[in-house]
Amino acid sequence: MPGPANDTNGVTAGLVCAHHHLYSTLARGMPPPPKQPTSFLEILENIWWRLDTALDLDMLAWSAKLGALEALEAGCTAIIDHHESPKAIEGSLTVIADACAEVGVRVNTCYGITDRHGAGGASRGLAENDRYLHECAERGDPRRHGMVGVHAAFTCTDESLAAAAELAAKHGVGVHIHVAEGVDDVGAADRIRDLTRDDWLLIHGVHLPDGHALHGTIVHNPRSNMNNAVGYANPARFANPVALGTDGIGADMLAEFQLAYVRQREHDVDAGPDHAWSWMQRGRDLFPEAHDDRVTWSYAPIEPWHVAFTPTIRAIDVDIDGEPALRDGVATRVDAAEVRAKAAEQAARLHAALA
């Protein structure tokens, strides 16, 4: 069998998106915000926090299903998802996991707790994480896992941060949290340092100091960081392991790798693609079942010095758990046209609620 990393025959293990927001798949084409954002906090307030409060479970199901389908078509067989839908919390993580299962894609999801809707909102988020993690343990399904989610330190009280860490330890999982993405969260390291463990996912880290002393994997999201104009994380400076995510902008990990490489090279002219390649490969360590998946690509060899400069590499065949999920670029378990049509209907509902 081909190895999990580079392969000269154009066959690899499945790719992993180490940080996604499947709830944002329907955001494309959404109405413009009521106020043009001029800072990262205003982007959150005027775009993403308006979006997540408009979601219901029907919207979420088709958003997750479309996101999973697009991941599969890009050779990404496992998604580590971070979810928020403050008006539709209970059962939301099962809706996401069921949608991914229908497509055939593996998922590790969590609910991002926050105190921006009051202590009751944070408690409901913790309860949803707890409920879903119990469900995962009962199912024992290698295609669905969970963590405890936290939006970010700057939207949570110290009590909520401690409660999330305690719940994660109880279930033997890590915490999935945005850390120092923008200047509003620049003090995050001081607030969570004593809580972090090696199984935590620390998302972004743009404004973390070099010697932050946090435990866990840094997940780099270059396209999102550039889009939100929050700065460059320069993840090569960290002693932590580094993985690669998309922060909700699809799950095309080869494209994200290509951008991660050129962004690093812009910062450091001596950088080659191997660093960014290792960040992408690190995702498989976070979702080890993906090592058993197989993706046949439209190009060979799949290795950093070729992929970095080769556009439009496509997944041709994908097998997950030894079963076909994609053949000749077409999903085998769902009707892709139907998924896109139903998702478009739900996107219209969502956009109408935002208008």
Image (cartoon, rainbow, N blue to C red):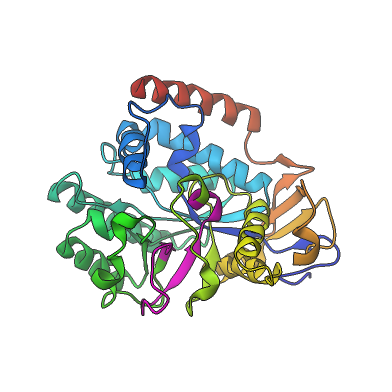
Residue in front for this viewpoint, 84 or 341: 84
Residue 94, given in percent of the width and then of the height, sits at 39, 47
Image coordinates for residue 66, horizontal then vertical, percent? 55, 37
> Which quarter of the rendered picture does the N terminus lie within?
bottom right
Residue 220 horizontal side relative to residue 4, left or right: left
Indicate the position of residue 276 as horizontal and vertical percent values: 63, 66
Identified at 46% across, 56% down, the residue is 231
Q: Which residue range is magenta in the image?
A: 202-225
* The magenta stretch spans residue 259: no
Q: Quadrant of residue 23?
A: top left
Query: Does residue 293 sit above or below 125 in this rendering?
Result: below
Residue at the spot 41% in from the left edge and 23% down from the top edge: 351
Q: State left or right for residue 304 relative to residue 100.
A: right
Where does the C terminus fall, quadrant-wise?
top left
Residue beneath the point at 56% across and 44% down? 250
Q: Is residue 151 visible?
A: no
Asked whether residue 221 is drawn in magenta, I would say yes
For residue 225, above or below residue 195: above
The image position of residue 223, as x and y in percent, is: 55, 50
